[in-house]
Image (spheres, rainbow, N blue to C red):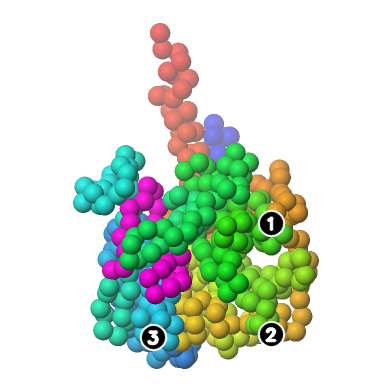
Amino acid sequence: MKRRTILRGTLLAVIALSAGLLAVGWLQAPEDATASAAEQMDRPFEERDPVAGDRAGATVVTTDPPGANDGTAAIVAFAPDGRPLYHNDTYGNYFDVDPDPEDSRSVLYVAGSRYDSCPSDVAARAEESFEDGCAKVVVERANLTTGETERLHTAVTGWDIWHDVDRVGDDELLVADIAEDRAFVLNLTTDEREWTWNADEDYDKDESGGAPGDWTHINDVEALEDGRVMVSLRNHDRVAFVEPGEGVERDWTLGAEDAYDTLYEQHNPDYIPEKRGGPAVIVADSENNRVVEYQRDESEWSRSWEWSDDRLQWPRDADRLPNDHTLVTDSQGNRILELDEDDEVVWTVSVPTPYEAERLGTGDESAGGWSKAAIEGESGEYVGGGDGEMESKTGLAWAVAFLTGPAVNGVLYVAPAWMTVSDVAVAGALAASAGALLLLELRWSRFGIRSIRRRP
């Protein structure tokens, strides 16, 4: 009986302590974090916590919350002086956003909604039937001053919304087709694909990537000035360079599958050409909870810059601005922040689950920015380069990387916005203790397992 009392008391103490710590975390969280996503989006910019200084241009942000079609996703814009400038929450998820054209107050974005059961009006647009749900994809152009929106293209995919589209001509878009593991150029006039690269042309589905339904998770594409296409293969932990008609240039690949020291399920890499201090790639190294830049020296990539802080969790965008600052999208930290050339945070705004941010007037993504190596006049440590040259993690190292990356970030993605990594750990202790106490009480009760076994 004494042992039973000690166990019960210990578990009750853990439960009480965990509940108390969670209550303190909730009470001490910034006001923006405890408000609903819709309330956060509608709150005046100057009331957000914290905000530091005006910017030289409007900032446009897309969001990708875990809920679907519930009005919490949006594309929003803030004027240089902080006033809310634009807000549209028509669709369930918003992804890529680019200035269109670069020096205007109009933006091109891709968005859409996912459906567990494909609605008849959406299914009617599809080229094939989807029994297990579908996603409606829209490419639109919005004038942030007038609010006028123009639909450029509508598509239906089997399971997910395109994550990136870039204008590469007056009537042409370069598309990262996440659902079909491919990149292609879409002619908006004819609705035909003019060029297509399928990932299975260069990679074996049986030897690399994720599950069959989400093999590559192509989440970003970029047309380079030399004619190549840079492609982010998230589930392959690599950024590939595709020569149209030739395929992947293996010796240019940044990262390798499971080489988590280099990249771990990255998002939104930006290419910086030689004329601005490159070749270099700045990328949100999402599951490593950092933003990094790699510099290419002859035939090798080296890490030339890395940044994180105690709050940064699952970043999904980093843009180098012309003033040598870096605009970072912190998805699980629920904020957009700007770093100066010394990596000090000089501006930040709270936004729930942001996906991408653009500073208008600075060019598309990192188009006007310089490499960190050029800014600082130095390069970083060698990390290897090319497919197969980077050592993959196995065993314990892989497990640690998974627990500190996808496991925690996945929980935070669906957890309340005010919760931090430590809050998740406390919640886990609370759940485990409560579950253990429930099982023990059941075992000790007259209706427990032993009494059931004794019944004839």
**Contact, CB < 8 Å: mark 3 with mark 2?**
no
**What residue sits 70% from the left and 83% below the top?**
374
Indicate the quadrant containing the C terminus: top left, top right, bottom left or bottom right. Answer: top left
**Contact, CB < 8 Å: mark 1 with mark 2?**
no
Indicate the quadrant containing the N terminus: top left, top right, bottom left or bottom right. Answer: top right
Instruction: Look at label 3 and name its amino acid.
Output: Ser
Q: Earlier in the sequence, mark 3 or mark 2?
A: 3
Q: Pinpoint residue 260: horizontal percent, then vertical percent.
A: 67, 56
Determine which quarter of the picture holds residue 326: bottom right
Gap in angstroms between the C-alphas marked 1 and 3:
37 Å
**As displayed, is residue 397 above or below residue 110?**
above
Residue located beneath label 3 in the image: 104
Residue located beneath label 2 in the image: 375
Front tag of 3 and 2:
3
Residue 164 visible, this orientation: no
Residue located beneath label 1 in the image: 250
Secondary structure state at the residue bearing disc 1: helix
Front tag of 1 and 3:
1
- Mark 1 neighbour class, 10 Å CA radius: few under 14, some 14 to 19, many 20 or more: some
Determine which quarter of the picture holds residue 4: top right
- Mark 2 neighbour class, 10 Å CA radius: few under 14, some 14 to 19, many 20 or more: few
Residue 316 among magenta residues: no
**What residue sits 76% from the left and 71% below the top?**
297
Front tag of 1 and 2:
1
Main SS of the magenta part reads strand
**As displayed, is residue 129 above or below residue 145?**
above
* Left or right of residue 262, residue 70 in this image: left
Segment colored magenta: 151-175
**As displayed, is residue 80 above or below residue 393?**
below
